[in-house]
Image (cartoon, grey):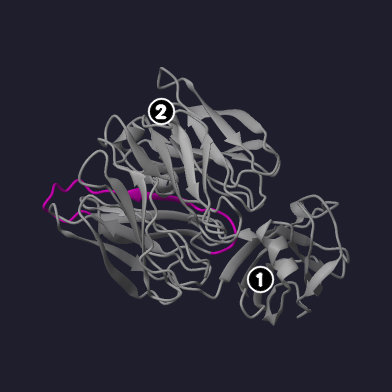
Amino acid sequence: MKKSFRNFFVLAVFTLMLSATANAEIFTAYLSSAQEVPTNASTATGYARIVVNESTGALTFTVVFNGLSSNQIASHIHAPAPIGTNVGVAINFGAVGGTSGTISGSTTITPTQLSQLRAHQGYVNVHSANFGGGEIRGQLGVQRPVDNDGDGRTDLSVLRFPNIAPPGVAPITYWNQNSTSGTQIGDWGDANRDFPAPGDYDGDGKTDLALYRDGSTGTGQSEFWILRSSDNNVQYYAWGVNGDTSVARDYDGDGITDVAIFRPGASPTAVTGWYIRNSATGTVRVEAFGITGDGTNNFDTPVPGDYDGDGKFDIAVYRFALSPANNFIVKRSSDNTITFQQFGNFNSDYILPGDYDGDGKTDYAAARTGALSTSPLVWWILQSSTGTTRTQTFGRTSDLPAQGDYDGDARTDLAVYRGGATATAASAFWVFRSFDNTPQVTTWGVGADFPVNFFDAR
């Protein structure tokens, strides 16, 4: 099952090029009345997109709101406060009036306020004449995975593959249900060669349709193909070779996804390599981190995440059947310290990094499969905020994990994709919403489709 992912890699460190970068981070929030304290009956919605340049202290903002019950009178960032708590104004956005509109501009942010946003301790509030204390509100968090419309919520997104055998080209059809703008359908890529590599490669706060194309021969050139959401232009990078694994994430903290691959060595004892193109500088970063293993019975698999909460993805692997087995091994970007955490069991578990407790740090997480396809899927999450383990039964063994922030509360939701019983039968996303601890089922896709958000499962 999950062993079909060819992943390998952990322990020496070699840096070819590391440059100081301006950390232009992007935070988003989904705005609704449900997050207001107290809640109200407004049906208005909206989203906020905040871009911060750490080196200059500059902050730019865009707040979009629709369907307020009365004219908008104010909007702010409030901090520090978690979900469910009210606190005073930290940064003022001003007023544009009307029941629908866009507020945009620039201001400054202090280092303390930035650390609060990184810890998900800030929220955006839009105030109206009828609701002076706030009509719609949303918790700010880092960009969500597979958020193609940039509204602060993970979209339902699947790939549909035509039945065209190689070497023919099998154009992939994206079926994407955006949370604000309905469905979008488009052809992009070749099902016989490509794997989804979603990310925000142009820095506009929206996930781009992106694919990693494995080289056609043993030393063949691999490629990233990106359809930029900002201008619908195609961006291309020749990066990696046949046998590499895409690990594109934002490693330099500039709000832009960096093209990156993970490469196994030539022998089981060889150290694996990470090849990262820093988008902030255009420089190349190469790090030896991980052990190759035999690729089948033992190996390291890449599990990058922001485990230290500094706004940059850390290089990390999960070690399977090598010593020390069943460990998350992380090189923290904040201080270059290497940490080990035993958690889960790759023989039976999916490894599913995500920020499930909403503190701005990636949690160690796994979902344990059972003996039968109908056996329950049991999620185990070591919460970084408390150091305690959360256990939750959700889904079944035959489901594909698809964790993401589907309800827009800046916390990763437990989620699975349940394929239809036949190639043409309806499939569904099952989401356990972290905001209200309720399950939500949405029919989307058919049995032959592949969920894009499975890209972050190992």
Q: Nearer the viewer, residue 89 or 282?
A: 282
Q: Nearer the viewer, residue 261 or 149?
A: 261
Residue 179, percent across and down?
Answer: 56, 56
In the rendered image, the vertical position of residue 285 relative to residue 57, given as above or below: above
Nearer the observer, disc 2 or disc 1? 2
Where does label 1 land, which residue? 64
Question: Which amino acid does the dot numbered 1 rest on?
Answer: Val
The residue most toward the top is 371
Where does label 2 land, which residue? 398
Q: Nearer the viewer, residue 162 or 436?
A: 436
Residue 56, percent across and down?
Answer: 63, 81
From where the camera sits, is residue 273 visible? yes
Would residue 165 appear left or right of 28 to someone viewing this image?
left
* Crowd band around label 1 with a 10 angstrom C-alpha radius: few (<14), some (14–19), many (20+): some
Would residue 54 appear left or right of 345 to someone viewing this image?
right
Residue numbers of the magenta segment: 150-170
Please report the residue visible at 40 percent of the width from the left and 36 percent of the height from the top. 319
Would residue 359 appear left or right of 207 to someone viewing this image?
right
Would residue 392 appear left or right of 402 to someone viewing this image?
right
Residue 201, percent across and down?
Answer: 43, 68
Question: Which amino acid does the dot numbered 2 rest on?
Answer: Ser
Q: Which element type, helix, strand or loop, lies under badge 2?
A: loop
- Image quadrant for the C terminus? top left
